[in-house]
Structures are given as structure tokens and as C-alpha cells.
Amino acid sequence: MFFLKLSDVGEFGLIKKLAAGCVNDFSTIVEGIGDDAAVLQPGKGQLLVTSDMLVEGVHFLTGKITMYQLGYKSIAASLSDIAAMGGKPRHALVSLAIPGNMAVEEIEELYLGMKSILSRYTVNLVGGDTVKSPVFTIDVTLLGETGPTGSVLRSGARPGDAVMVTGTPGASAAGLELLLNPGKWTGNLSLEDQEWLLAAHLTPEPALKQSATLVQMNCVTSMIDISDGIAGEINHICDRSGVGAEIYADKIPLSDTVARVAGLAGKNALDWALYGGEDYQLLFTVPAGEAQRVIDVFAAGRLGPVAVIGCIVEEKQGRKLVMSPEESVSLTSSAYNHFVEDR
Amino acid sequence: MFFLKLSDVGEFGLIKKLAAGCVNDFSTIVEGIGDDAAVLQPGKGQLLVTSDMLVEGVHFLTGKITMYQLGYKSIAASLSDIAAMGGKPRHALVSLAIPGNMAVEEIEELYLGMKSILSRYTVNLVGGDTVKSPVFTIDVTLLGETGPTGSVLRSGARPGDAVMVTGTPGASAAGLELLLNPGKWTGNLSLEDQEWLLAAHLTPEPALKQSATLVQMNCVTSMIDISDGIAGEINHICDRSGVGAEIYADKIPLSDTVARVAGLAGKNALDWALYGGEDYQLLFTVPAGEAQRVIDVFAAGRLGPVAVIGCIVEEKQGRKLVMSPEESVSLTSSAYNHFVEDR
């Protein structure tokens, strides 16, 4: 089979091949790909902007994820940041640093994955850059917009608030476990369970619908997405809000499937939820009296699991993981440090 | 001397060290670095957005440029894109992929260079990402805004328009020549000339003032910045505008200093201007009757050299470089193809 190499088509040839199907909402674009900068029509809300960089061998392994999945996931991660602000995603820019011997078909597959999720959420691909590099690197910038009530920050949590979480955290880590041990526990898991866990890791769904619902309910005091595990994220909220927190280990909603994989692998499902990362669920706080309303609205709207997992306390009370009425441990942030050599 | 390695401070430690001095215009920032996304107050104009990626060994050589200069230049290149649209730069996001053994001091120096030029043009640094990678990579996203007359695109050139250029193209290529041959022609050049050429390559000044003046004059029909040499850029304007062009070789404003370095190095100064790239000057078109007014306004405003170098013709007349009344050659785009292995 013949593969067209990037060195054959060059940067401008590649851009031409990829520029089709990038616009999903013409009303907000004055000039898309093809000029020195994209020209966009801003909405009425505040502007949200976030960048996420992914490096081969550090954030992904090309043998373990298809280019389509990688494209999908890299956009999903940025959409999740916009969800965490209570915003609507509008435009994406994708910068790629590509090894010269990579096949054009691979990059096209990557963009197919990106365009698939972008079109689902009516987000435009309006620009970026493509350059040569020895190491395949993706940088996604996402522009979004807030509604009339503005953005939901990490800094608004107050003592007495309930801490809530969407989905079943740890599913992404369980999916990674399956990926790293292909076939090892296949006999113990249904095909549906395997597919669900792999999708949780490879093609995660950003919680945009859930976020929009929460914004509409107008009760959220702080919000963050779980890219680095619940423990790391609750520490970010505490840092920015100047509060403490108690998280109840037995309230963290672990799926039976995740628990089963953890058992098979000799791992701890609670650890995955607390420190696993890449779940792209929402961690948020609401006044305690609003928690039941959130649970009811999620159930009525079929928005998936949502649960109270703890409460916000005074700063001086610290940050605790309550294991039982008798035992609680310090809730240390163990967020991934990309620069530590042996991780 | 002890250097703090990135693996010692981690991503969050690094962000804390770099977050100071990032805001130059508080009026447009609702929430800067520290949440899932930056929250910005959009202006009244259209939104401009551009991304540029730079890879060590491909776009820069760390031994030939200081980290301060590299930071300065990487922002300058993106500011130049905003200038080329006739816009005002507002906010920058910087994503860095950094080798784990790089010293924190190096990254701080890089940011010093970035902050220096950002503060000069009252642009905020509002976010980005820092990750680990075997290859040092910088991706800059710049957000800007147009004035009431909107953006200046590449697509508005019409037959009869004059083609004009700011500055003296080729200066960046001459500076690179000096850099690659340290000390070789030092005796033949004054210290001022050497400094000017090195600055043209290492710390280029984006033509934002010139762009703002042109927008105010309201006569520019198309505009682009010269990042890939005049030949490549005029071809982009012709492609997008559906026109042809004649560029007069003897009208291209070459500085005496650039010509002298070319002579010493056995190179062709005209080639540098046409194909050298990284000049970050503006190439633009105006109705022929407006050209003299542009020259007068630039002189009065001390905005540096500006010259008519050709004219726009019908598409079917093609794109020509006129060498003399008898000789003209096809103006082929020789824009840098990053993916060709041997370049």
C-alpha cells in the first residue's frame, strides 16, 4: 500500500487537504482557515479560552490509541475545560508538530476524529499551525462563550456547600488498565463493559450537557473538570476558594465494572477515582439545600450519574478523606507531575 | 552554580513562578491564569485568533538564540499576524513542551522575553499549558480585535492596485547569515550595522504601528505579513484575490547593509528579500492613486521605509518578477516546506 508522506505534500498541501468540513456554525465566522488569522464574530457573553498540549510518549502512545481516537480525545479534553467554566464551546485551533515520515493518511484520520466531535457540539475548526518535529505533538486551543450569568470559577465554594461529581470516576483509569493488558481479563468482562471502559479512556465525552444544565439551574458555586483525579481537583477548588473539604470515601460513585477490573488487576478502584485522572467529569459545589434538586434534574434529563461525595468546610479544618466515622486521612493532591522523570 | 530543574518544581510550581506580570490591561480580563480557562471581556470589534508553533532544531537553534530572544521572537511572529489583519493584539496563550532536564531559569528567561514585548504592546498573557517533551516546542496563540472597519484580508487585491512593502526585506536573512558565521565579517561591518541585522533576525519588531496607520487611512485592499519572503506572500495574495501581479526587482528596497553582507557572503540580497522569510514586515495593496499618500504619511509619522514594488494585474497575466524592460521571470512561490527532509 502506498502512503503519501508529509514531506511530499508540504505544509500548504496538507492544510488544503484538511480545510474541508471545518465549519459547523457559519454565523460566527467572518474568515476561517486561509488568512494570517481567523476572523470571528464574538457573541454577547464573556470569552473563554484554553490551551492543552499533548506529546507522544508522554500523554499518549501511538500504538495504544488510533489516530481517530487521539483526535477525538484531544478535542474532548479541551471541550471539558469549557464545560468546567459553564461555557459553550465555539471555535478550535489545532497546532500539530509532525514527524516528516508520518503518512498524510494518519493526519487525515486524526482530523476525522477531531471533526467528528467538533461537529457534534457545533464547534468550528478555524486555524492552527502545522510544522515538522521529531516528536508528534498536538496543541489544541478552544474558544468558548459564557451565557448571561457569566462563568463558573473554581473560587466560589463556601463552607456548608455540598461537593458533587458527575459520572463514575475511575472509568478512564480502568480503561487504560485494559489497554495496557490486552486480552488479559477479556474472559471476565462482557463486550459491552470492555467497550464502555475503553471508550471512557480513548473517546471520553465532555460533560457539556451536564454543565449547561447546571448553569441553567444557577446554583453552582464552583466547578472544575476531573482531568487529574478527584483529589487533585478538590485541592484546586480549596486553594482558589480559601476553604477546606471533607470527601467521604464511601460516597464516591464507583461503577461495578470499574471495581471488577480493579479487583482483577490487583488495583484499588478508589485510588483510580482519586488519583487516576482523565475522567473529564465535573466536580462542583452547590449550597447543601440544592443538592437534591441537582440529583432530580439529572435523573429527569437522563444526564447520567451525579452524587454528593462530601462537603466544604472552613479552611482551618483542612482537606480530609473520610474513610469511616473513626478514620480520616489528609487529602493530598497527587496531581500528575509531567516533569518527574520516572513517571 | 545550582540550577533548579523542571522535574524539581513540577508543572504547578512552574506556573506559579511564571504567573506574575502577565496582565498588562486589567480592563479586558475577568479571570486570568489559574482556572480551567481564561475568562475575557470581548471588545466591540471582530475577534482575531492565530496560532504559531516553533520547534527546536526546526525553527530555532538554542545555541544561536538566547531564551530571552526566543521568547521575544515567538510572540513577535504572532503579533505580526495580527498586524497583517489590521487588528489590535489583546491576549496571548503560550503552550510549552519542555525537556525535563531544562533549568527553570531558562524558562523564566524565555518568559521575560515574552513579557517584555507583550507589555510594550499592552497584551495580556492569559493562559496556555506546560508539559514535558523530549523536544522543546513553543505554541503561541494570539487573540486580537479589529477596529470599526473590520479586518484586512488577503483577498481584496484588484487589478491596478499598487503592491507596497514596509521596511527593508532581507534584513532577517542577513542577520541569520551573521549568526551562522560568527566573527567572519565583523571587520567589514560597523557595530551598529551588526546589531541592527542581528536584531532583525532575533528580536524582530512586528509592524503594528504601521498596520494601525494603514487601517486608519482606510485604503488598503489586501495585506499579509512577510514570514515566508515576498515571493511566497504575493502568491498568497494572488491566490486569495484571484489576480496576477508584477513585481519590479529594482524597486524592492534593499538596505545597503543587507547588500554588503550578501556581497561578503557570496549571496544574493534580492533572493533574501524574495525567499528569505522571517522579516515580519507588511506586504499590502492599495489603489494606485493612494500609494503616494501612504508614503507621505509614513514619512510624517516616522514609520520607517515603505515602497511601491509592483502592481496587481489580471489573473490571466500571471505572476511575474520583472528584472528589466526586456526580461521577466515567473514569480514562483518558494515558501519554506517544513516537511522536506533535507531543508
Image (cartoon, coloured by chain):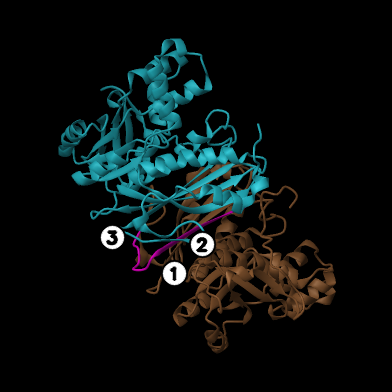
Chain colours: A brown, B cyan
In percent of width and height, residue A264 lies at 84, 72
Q: Residue at x 79, y 71 (%)?
A: A262
Rendered position, B109 above or below A98: above
Q: Main secondary structure of the magenta part?
A: strand
Name the residue beneath numbered marker 3. Answer: B44
* Residues at marks 3 and 2 on the same chain: yes
Choose top left, top right, bottom left or bottom right for residue A253.
Answer: bottom right
Q: Is residue A46 magenta?
A: yes
Q: Select label 3 or label 2 by which is in front.
A: 2
Magenta-tinted stretch: A39-54
* Residues at marks 2 and 1 on the same chain: no
Name the residue beneath numbered marker 2. Answer: B35
Q: Mark 3 or mark 2, which has the lower sequence index?
A: 2
Q: CA distance from mark 1 to mark 3?
A: 20 Å
Q: Chain of mark 2?
A: B
Residue A161 as seen in the image, left or right of residue B159: right
Q: Nearer the viewer, residue A90 or B326?
A: A90
Q: Is residue B250 magenta?
A: no
Type of amino acid under label 1: Ser
Type of amino acid under label 2: Asp
SS class, disc 2: loop
Q: Where residue B200 is drawn, which disc sits there? A: none
Residue A185 as seen in the image, left or right of residue A247: right
Type of amino acid under label 3: Lys
Q: Where residue A151 is drawn, which disc sits there? A: 1
In percent of width and height, residue B181 lies at 52, 19
Q: From this viewpoint, which residue is outermost toward the front?
A: A316
Is residue A79 shown to the viewer in this render?
no
Q: Nearer the viewer, residue B241 or B137?
A: B137
SS class, disc 3: loop
In percent of width and height, residue A291 lies at 56, 84
